[in-house]
């Protein structure tokens, strides 16, 4: 007798209290994430099945919240969207408590190390400590893998119920190539589903006996990994710690012997870290630092100010996600309403909607975020570089001042241009990405040098040959040192014809979330266009606004992701 193949279970109907605009807005965010953070608006209309007017209103609302940008015909995910995933990661406390231990293990073994959590019948990464090699791990925080394709999945599946196994088998039949998991290479369409199921069940049993799991090139040829479960004080597996290597370094047979002793020691340290009480009060409910205006400024605006395109129920629902965070892993309805400033009835409907969609779980009294929140664009955005974050803000700056704007980082005793938006003028400053200049006679170089600790700054100046490039170049070490002290006090540098005759440049620092100066942004212009005083009066405020906007994005993006300078 032939049995019909199982199919993926249909999604349950939304509850009567569900907020329709919130559901529609989340569907747009999911489709935008599926397009790696950029999709034509027309494509979003087609893939979501929503009316064009609905998609336009959703995108208008998301743009007002800072979660997307509209660039021509495309919708683009903005770094601010990461605050939703940050809320889950902070509430879980896994990256904060266990991330440093994972980083230390990666340094000791000189291999990539990951932390992953279960997400349905998949595995989602919450921390990555990667090694820079020609062949290295390319997964990002938030990426989702099928449970059967990797070492952690066998550990998590040991706790599955029969219903969980049925859902997994149905998914395997409905999606034989793993098209629903874009982070992994596609599986062959003729893969033996029954054989793969039996093999996964055998690996689950083997992992249960051994206490660890092996991935022998399950994701792609050459990639091998060993994972061990990390348990809380009650003995529940909360995440898996994996060490990932390549067969060019260690074979699947060699990897366990090479890494298991240190892996087990780290797991023990992680268990202790999870059991240790966290000191201090809960962190604030958003990525906005103390003393800054809250993110939900739209709540103080009138309907006329917000305009007819702004969907308040969507904004309120997304705001609900940010109520969670460090020390606020589980919240009752009253705490969510208090943290967000929403009415209890409004917060309740949003929570019910988010629970229905799988972004929250609840026991009827307390609500907890799930790792599914990371599907809302976190993986793509966590890979943003500093130049990518700065580029739209530099473009806005150029529109405002009508002169070219750039970003540079310190590279040895030189600055290196990493982002630039030129302006269109008959006579303009012609600089390309990657260009290097000495730091001492440039505005961005002086801002970057001024941001260094005094001892390091003095050491750099002592070994730098201060060459006269124009008749205006400052080459006296004492005078240059005094100028840098003034730059540090003023928070900006103006350099007048010291790098090149006729070139005037004004720069300000860009700080990361720790307050460290990581880059500088500047506006360069011809000295004949305005006086230094006019430049300070007209360009400096716009330049500072751009730096503040870049820093706001860095504050959110750099909370759990490493932001590369290049």
Image (tube, rainbow, N blue to C red):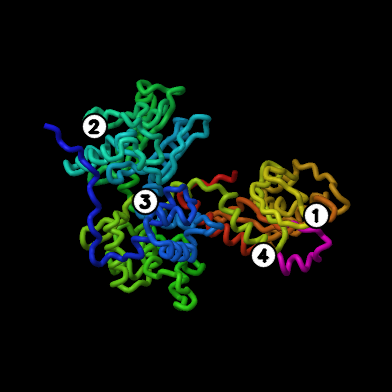
Q: Measured from the top left, where is residue 334 in percent x and y?
A: 29, 69
Q: Residue furthest right?
A: 471
Residue position for label 2? 197
Mark 4 secondary-structure assignment = helix
Q: Measured from the top left, where is residue 309 in percent x and y?
A: 45, 70
Of the two numbered discs 1 and 4 on the same chain, state the one appearing first in sequence: 4
Q: Measured from the top left, where is residue 450 in percent x and y?
A: 68, 54
Tell me which corner region of the image, top left, top right, bottom left or bottom right, holds residue 472. bottom right
Q: Tell me the CA gap for discs 1 and 3.
A: 49 Å
The magenta segment is 524-543
* Residue located at (35% from left, 63% from top): 22
Residue position for label 3? 93
Mark 3 secondary-structure assignment = loop
Residue position for label 1? 479
Main secondary structure along the magenta-highlighted residues = helix
Tell me which corner region of the image, top left, top right, bottom left or bottom right, holds residue 193. top left
Q: Quadrant of the N terminus?
A: top left
Mark 1 secondary-structure assignment = helix
Q: Tell me the CA gap for discs 4 and 2.
A: 59 Å
Of the two numbered discs 4 and 3 on the same chain, state the one appearing first in sequence: 3
Residue position for label 4? 400
* Residue located at (88% from left, 52% from top): 471
Front position among marks 2 and 3: 2
Q: Residues within 10 Å of mark 4 (few under 14, many from 20)?
A: few
Of the two numbered discs 2 and 3 on the same chain, state the one appearing first in sequence: 3
Mark 2 secondary-structure assignment = helix
* 161 with respect to 358 (left or right): left
């Amino acid at each position: 007798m032939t049995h019909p193949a199982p199919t993926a279970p249909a999604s349950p109907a939304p509850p009567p209290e569900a907020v329709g605009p919130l559901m529609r807005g989340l569907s747009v965010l999911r489709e935008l994430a599926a397009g790696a953070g950029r999709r034509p608006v027309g494509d979003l209309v087609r893939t979501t099945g929503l009316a064009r007017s609905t998609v336009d209103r959703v995108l208008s609302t998301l743009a007002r919240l800072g979660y997307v940008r509209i660039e021509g015909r495309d919708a683009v995910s903005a770094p601010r969207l990461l605050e939703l995933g940050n809320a889950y990661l902070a509430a879980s406390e896994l990256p904060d408590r266990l991330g440093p231990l994972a980083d230390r293990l990666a340094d000791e073994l000189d291999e990539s190390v990951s932390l992953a959590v279960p997400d349905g019948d998949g595995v989602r990464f919450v921390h990555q400590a990667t090694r820079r090699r020609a062949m290295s791990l390319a997964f990002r925080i938030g990426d989702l893998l099928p449970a059967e394709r990797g070492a952690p999945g066998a550990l998590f599946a040991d706790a599955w119920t029969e219903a969980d196994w049925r859902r997994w088998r149905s998914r395997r039949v409905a999606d034989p190539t793993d098209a629903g998991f874009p982070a992994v290479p596609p599986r062959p369409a003729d893969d033996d589903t029954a054989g793969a199921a039996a093999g996964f069940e055998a690996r689950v049993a083997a992992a249960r006996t051994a206490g660890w799991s092996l991935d022998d090139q399950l994701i792609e040829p050459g990639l091998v990994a060993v994972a061990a479960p990390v348990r809380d004080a009650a003995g529940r597996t909360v995440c898996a710690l994996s060490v990932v290597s390549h067969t060019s370094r260690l074979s699947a047979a060699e990897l366990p012997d090479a890494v298991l002793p240190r892996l087990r020691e780290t797991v023990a340290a992680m268990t202790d870290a999870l059991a240790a009480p966290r000191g201090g009060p809960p962190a604030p409910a958003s990525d906005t630092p103390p003393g800054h205006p809250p993110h939900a400024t739209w709540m103080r605006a009138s309907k006329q100010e917000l305009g007819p395109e702004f969907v308040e129920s969507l904004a309120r629902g997304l705001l609900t996600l940010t109520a969670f965070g460090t020390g606020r892993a589980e919240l009752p309805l009253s705490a969510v309403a208090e943290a967000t400033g929403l009415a209890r009835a409004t917060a309740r409907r949003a929570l019910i909607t988010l629970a229905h969609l799988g972004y929250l779980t609840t026991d009827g009294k307390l609500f907890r975020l799930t790792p599914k929140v990371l599907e809302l664009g976190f993986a793509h955005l966590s890979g943003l570089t500093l130049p990518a974050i700065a580029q739209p803000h530099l473009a806005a700056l150029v529109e405002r001042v009508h002169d070219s704007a750039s970003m540079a980082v310190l590279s040895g005793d030189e600055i290196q241009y990493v982002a630039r938006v030129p302006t269109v003028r008959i006579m303009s400053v012609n600089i390309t990405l990657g260009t290097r200049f000495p730091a001492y006679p440039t505005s961005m170089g002086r801002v970057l040098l001024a941001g260094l600790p005094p001892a390091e700054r003095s050491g750099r100046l002592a070994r730098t040959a201060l060459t006269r490039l124009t008749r205006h170049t400052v080459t006296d070490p004492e005078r240059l040192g005094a100028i840098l002290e003034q730059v540090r006090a003023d928070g900006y540098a103006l350099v007048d014809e010291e790098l090149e005759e006729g070139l005037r440049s004004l720069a300000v620092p860009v700080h990361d979330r720790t307050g460290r100066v990581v880059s500088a942004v500047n506006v360069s212009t011809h000295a004949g266009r305005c006086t230094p005083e006019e430049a300070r009066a007209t360009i400096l405020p716009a330049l500072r606004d751009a730096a503040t906007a870049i820093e706001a994005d860095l504050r959110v993006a750099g909370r759990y992701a490493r932001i590369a300078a290049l």
